[in-house]
Image (cartoon, grey):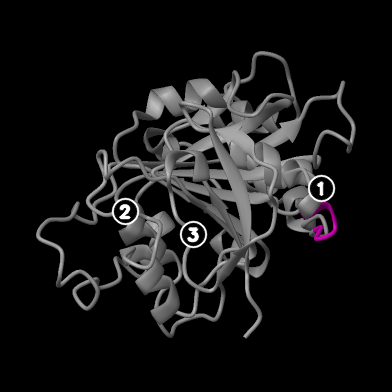
Amino acid sequence: MPLKDALNNDKELYPGWLENSYWLESVKSQKTPAGPAAAFADALNGVPGARKVFLKADSRNLALPEFPSRDMMKGRVVFYPGAGTDGQPVRLFSGAHAAHCFIYADYAVKRNEITRQLGENLLPGYKPLFVIEGGEKDFFPNGWEDLREVYTDIDEFHAPELQWGIWAVLEREPQYDAGHGPKRLLFCYLCCDAISAFTSLWPRGKRRTFPYGLVIEDSGFGANWAVFGSEKSQLYKIAGRNHALPNWLLVAVGRGAQAWPGYARFTQETEPGGADKAERALFIKKEV
């Protein structure tokens, strides 16, 4: 069974808040019709040539929308630790209409590379309506969750510090229809330690939500301080402790990555992904 077909029977209703006009309403109150406020409104309205990347430096002149974490967490989120610039999970889950929100985390990627990829080939058939840079308080309003309980057996780990973070609303290009994917998607990229990000997005005892999907791509540690897959994974321990085990794992079996305990392989067929196009398979959480 192809991976997309495996998800086709588990579609998510299109989240209406992606059509909400509060992004546009946030600039209507601006007294000055020109400048960043007008550019933001033009970007939302698809005006050719409108500026679509809005950085924190604009905030003095423009009431930028807040990161919609509450809306996101009410629906399905796919989380990708150590993501690089790999768009395959977005294409897979959105192409099946199974998820509309995606959070990537990696501390070894430059912001301009991601913003460039968003406008080019990270997700073919989609263009950003806008891209907004945020700070730690935007993405982690309650701060970083304490990790000391779970990394006591690790000699070193990457400190929980956000180097930069962006979020974007992507819209399907007009030459494509729903067969290509949903009308709009929300994409977030956090340049920070992925395990710290996961723990703070799905903290212990503070909310009973969990990711819909999670990508496991291990390459013999590489630049990571811990593997993401197998029963040894710190991420697995945190997800279990925080009651945040995802429904699906997308595992790079072609690179030897291992699924977590409690998950069964759902697709024998595979699909290439990542920088080296290693084969990936879907694993589903077993019912308890």
Mark toward the start of the polypeptide (1 vs 3): 1
Q: Residues under labels 1 and 3: Cα distance?
A: 20 Å
Quarter occupied by residue 35: top right
Secondary structure mostly taken by the magenta-highlighted segment of the chain:
loop
Give, as a three-letter code, the residue at label 2.
Answer: Val
Q: Which mark is residue 259?
A: 3
Q: Are marks 3 and 2 in contact (CB under 8 Å)?
A: no
Q: Quadrant of the C terminus?
A: bottom right
Is there any visible trace of residue 24 in the rendered image?
A: no
Residue in the picture at 31% in, 65% down: 232
Residue in the picture at 74% in, 56% down: 17
Relative to 5, is 118 on the left or the right?
left
Q: Residues under labels 3 and 2: Cα distance?
A: 11 Å
Q: Secondary structure at mark 3?
A: loop
The image shows residue 194 at horizontal and vertical percentages of: 35, 53
Quarter occupied by residue 206: bottom left
The image shows residue 4 at horizontal and vertical percentages of: 76, 44
Given residues 93 and 153, the one toward you in this image is 153
Residue labelled with disc 1: 5
Q: Which mark is residue 227?
A: 2
Give the magenta-colored segment's residue range. 7-11
Give, as a three-letter code, the residue at label 3.
Answer: Ala
Give, as a three-letter code, the residue at label 1.
Answer: Asp
